[in-house]
Amino acid sequence: MGILSVFMTKLMKFFKKENTLYPPIEPYDSGFIKTGIHEIYYEQCGNPNGKPAVFLHGGPGGGAGSFSRRFFDPKKYRIVLFDQRGCGKSKPHTCLEDNTTWHLVEDIELIRKKLKINQWLVFGGSWGSTLALAYAQRHPENVTELVLRGIFMLRNKELKWFYQYGASEVYPEAWQGFLKEIPEERRFDLIEAYRDIFNGDDEEKKLSAAKAWSKWEASTSYINHNPEAIKESVNSEFALAFALIENHYFVHKGFLDYEDQLLDNIDIIRHIPAVIVQGRYDVVCPPTTAHELHSKWPESELKIAPYSGHSAFEKEITHLLIETTDKFSKN
């Protein structure tokens, strides 16, 4: 049998057993929690008496969105979502003051306590995986399981790969759109060059740069071109929060104490059941980071989606994530 035939046979077998997103649902509860100058939007969906799970969105600055509710069986899970500081429905919009990883970690605890949840499953992809690891290492007693996707640990090599040189070689046409906002003499450090624009007073230039920043990630997140994702990425309100908050965190290296903090602290969470889902062709958060995490944490389960990129909404990745939440719903 030829290589192409083998590939097609495996692909057909996969799609015969494909798990898809659960049907759309609406929250049965929502509100805001005030903490300092911030008001954090949260919502609860699914079964009020079900297994608690908290969804940590990406970015930072991406917001949760209604599709994020659908990775969990609503009959079995009490699903909690929230928009992290400065984005989505949380207020004030794009606010960077008191906006760090450790503020977000404590926001998660604030929500857990308000909702009177003792322990919960923590689900996070991309930046959400960073935050999930940080939260679990700070509060391991409150985590029943971890579902992690597209691993990102905010190390210098990861940031350089996506925002300086690496992914640019895979998506050269999209990269030109990201580069054009920055003068040639400033392109030796693109994250810092964008920071100067975002900290400036030229609102028109800031919006243009924010759209370019956001579009770059949307253009590289799917194995196949996704015009709808790209269109959504350049919505002005979304792009400003996404770009300004991401850049703020990346300039500060995620506010971690040191680069390998999340890897070095694996012993704290080694006992927690964990599944890592990773797209083989993820150029936003390449598989090498998931491999490093799993190597340091062999008790975790690593599931590779062999024909997928970065997004949680790639069919294979969605399948593996739902396969995992279905399995953990029985715990």
Image: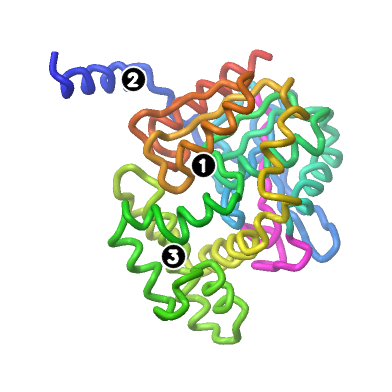
Dot 1 falls on a residue whose secondary structure is helix
Q: Is the magenta stretch mostly helix, strand or loop?
A: loop
Query: Which mark is nearer the camera, 3 or 1?
Result: 3
Horizontal placement of 27 versus 14: left or right?
right
| Residue at which label 3 appears | 234
For mark 3, does the 10 Å Cα neighbourhood hold few (<14), some (14 to 19), or many (20 or more) residues? many
Horizontal placement of 322 versus 227: left or right?
right
What range is drawn magenta here?
A: 77-99
Horizontal placement of 150 versus 114: left or right?
left
| Residue at which label 1 appears | 67
**Residue 142: x percent and y percent?**
81, 30
Which residue is at 69% across, 38% downward? 133
Of the residues shown, which amino acid type is indicated by label 1?
Phe
Q: In this view, does 16 lie above or below 113?
A: above
Query: Disc 3 versus disc 1: distance between alpha carbons?
Result: 19 Å
Q: Earlier in the sequence, mark 1 or mark 2?
A: 2
Q: Quadrant of the C terminus?
A: top right
Of the residues shown, which amino acid type is indicated by label 2?
Phe
